[in-house]
Amino acid sequence: MMTETKRVNSKSVLEIDSLRKEFTGVAALDGVSLEIKNKEIVGIIGPNGAGKSTLFNCVMGVYEPTDGEVHLGETDITGEFTSRIVRRGISRAFQQARVFPGLTVRENMLANQDHEDENVVRTLFSNAEMTDRMNDLIRQVGLWDLRDRKAGELSTGQKKLLTIAAALMQDPEIVMLDEPTAGVNPNLIDDIINTIVDLNHDGATFCIIEHDMDVIHTLSDYVYVLNNGTNLTEGPPEVALDNPDVLEAYFGE
Ligand code: ADP
Ligand code: MG
């Protein structure tokens, strides 16, 4: 099967080993382990409170893990600052798409989370390589006609497409997407799915938290199911999502 071949053959990009995160008495993560391989789309699902967002926050250095390790390739990045982790090559797009509403689509592409200063945007614009990359990505996510619009005028789905494109600007090793289709108009969901597939064909690696089972089924090469801060099961989507324990965790309560 193709998904399995892909999984066996490619090298590991991100490895999470026995990750634990406690908040005053509560273990949001109680020893989660997972692996994302080069050029994969890995889905992470689990009911509310399973620990998905905490996992992303630990990977991105927003939270310092209580125990366990996060490796990007060969490098142990556990507990590093977010800015450093981003520079090492992990990008993130948030569930509530974060754009600068007063900047245009193209300006937003260059104004990443670390730079709110307008002058930084201008400096980056003068770099031809960056401009080419920006234009290619804007075309690829289907926002070309809106490139000089203010981001604040975009729909939720268009903002998500913009943040996905912006996350790819620095050619990251891996892109973490938190619920890319949440809150999106149903007729834009396919655009988002197709865009992610398209970017993946061009070599991008994705780790995606997603609540919508159909979306996870369509997109993922491999799925990890979390429950109560632990690994419940994993596998290709057609295997992992058919597991009775998963249906129980999702719909049983
Ligand atoms: P998910 O994203 O899968 O819905 P979360 O990672 O948001 O789950 O939460 C996992 C558990 O950790 C929940 O029980 C939640 O209440 C708890 N939790 C998450 N963040 C915090 C926090 N900052 N302080 C205390 N408890 C938290
Ligand atoms: Mg969450």
Image (tube, rainbow, N blue to C red):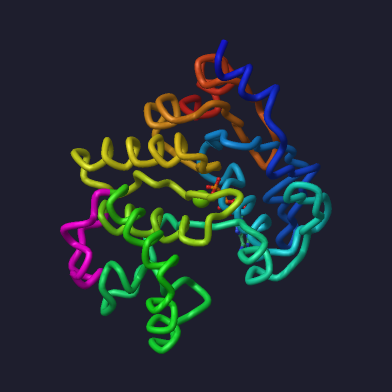
Residue beneath the point at 51% across and 40% down: 203
Q: Quadrant of the N terminus?
A: top right
**Measured from the top left, where is residue 183 in percent x and y?**
29, 49
**Measured from the top left, where is residue 66 in percent x and y?**
80, 58
**Measured from the top left, where is residue 201 in percent x and y?**
45, 34
Q: Identify which residue, 144 or 93, lies in the foreground.
A: 144
Side of 96 where 207 appears, left or right = right
Side of 222 where 21 appears, left or right = right
**Measured from the top left, where is residue 168 in percent x and y?**
47, 55
Residue beneath the point at 69% across and 24% down: 9
Q: Quadrant of residue 150?
A: bottom left
Query: Which region of the structure is painted magenta?
Result: 142-156
Q: Quadrant of residue 106?
A: bottom left
| Residue 118 versus residue 134 in the image, above or below | below
Residue beneath the point at 27% across and 35% down: 190
Question: Given the current orientation, which residue lies at the most extreme front position?
Answer: 128
Residue beneath the point at 74% across and 42% down: 15
| Residue 240 versus residue 82 in the image, above or below | above
Task: Indicate whether residue 168 is drawn in magenta.
Answer: no
